[in-house]
Each structure stands twice: as C-alpha cells, then as structure tokens.
Amino acid sequence: MGYGDWVVQLIRGQSYMGYITPAFSNVMLEWHVGCFKGFRLIPQNVLRAPYRCQACFERIVHGDDIMCFVVGKETGNRYSVCERRGYSVYSVAHTDCARERPICSR
C-alpha cells in the first residue's frame, strides 16, 4: 500500500462513546479498495450511536472490544489506521462475536 491510496481496513479496538472508530485500534487486515471483493459491508449510522453488533445485535457499549471496517486513505509510517475515513464504519461487531459468526455477507 502506498501513501494516499484508498484502502479498506479491518480494525480492532475499544469502543469509546463519542468517537466514530475504536480507540487505540490495530489494523488486522487491509486491502486496496479495488481489490476488496466478495463481501458486502454493512454500514452503521454514526449519527445514531451506540452501534449494534452485526453478529448478536446487542448494543455496543463504552469499552467493548470491537472489530469493524473503515475506508479511507493510507497513512504514512507514523499511523496505522487510514485517514479521511469520513463518518462511516461498517460491519461493527464485538470481537468475540466476530470470531463465532461472520460479520460480512457475500
């Protein structure tokens, strides 16, 4: 991935109310936008937080360990989570739930 490339990232971190993406996120997987195929990402309405887990449908609460997808521009070496993500997150799920059930649909 090159700096400024549009990417899709699967990130994991802790949910903090008032923030769109999880805090202290780790990038688990990453694709160029054009290479990400085969899965339909389910958008969450960031204006209607808290999110709901796509696997168990329970509310995501402050401090929960979660996984989600984001789309944005690849950053430099200093940061791992993409920039210019906008106000969208996709397929949000508790980390434990995501291990048991897929959070993307084909």
Image: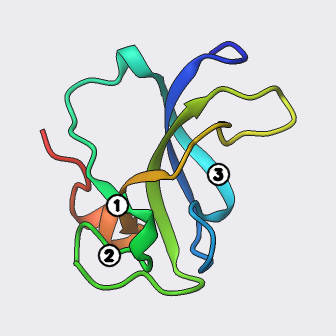
Q: Quadrant of residue 82?
A: top right
Q: Which residue is mark 1?
A: 44
Residue kind at label 3, given as amino acid type: Asn
Cα distance between the residues tagged 2 and 1: 8 Å
Q: Tag 1 or tag 3, which sits nearer the N-term?
A: 3
Q: Which residue is mark 3?
A: 26
- Please tell me whether mark 2 or mark 1 is closer to you in this view: 1
Callout 1 environment at 10 Å: few (<14), some (14 to 19), or many (20+)?
many
- Please tell me whether mark 3 or mark 2 is closer to you in this view: 2
Q: Tag 1 or tag 2, which sits nearer the N-term?
A: 1
Instruction: In the rendered view, tell whether residue 3 sits above or below residue 73.
Output: above
Residue kind at label 2, given as amino acid type: Arg
Mark 3 and mark 1 in contact? Answer it, CB < 8 Å. Answer: no
What residue is drawn where x is 37% and y is 16%?
Answer: 35
Q: Quadrant of residue 36?
A: top left
Residue kind at label 1, given as amino acid type: Gln
Q: Which residue is mark 2?
A: 52
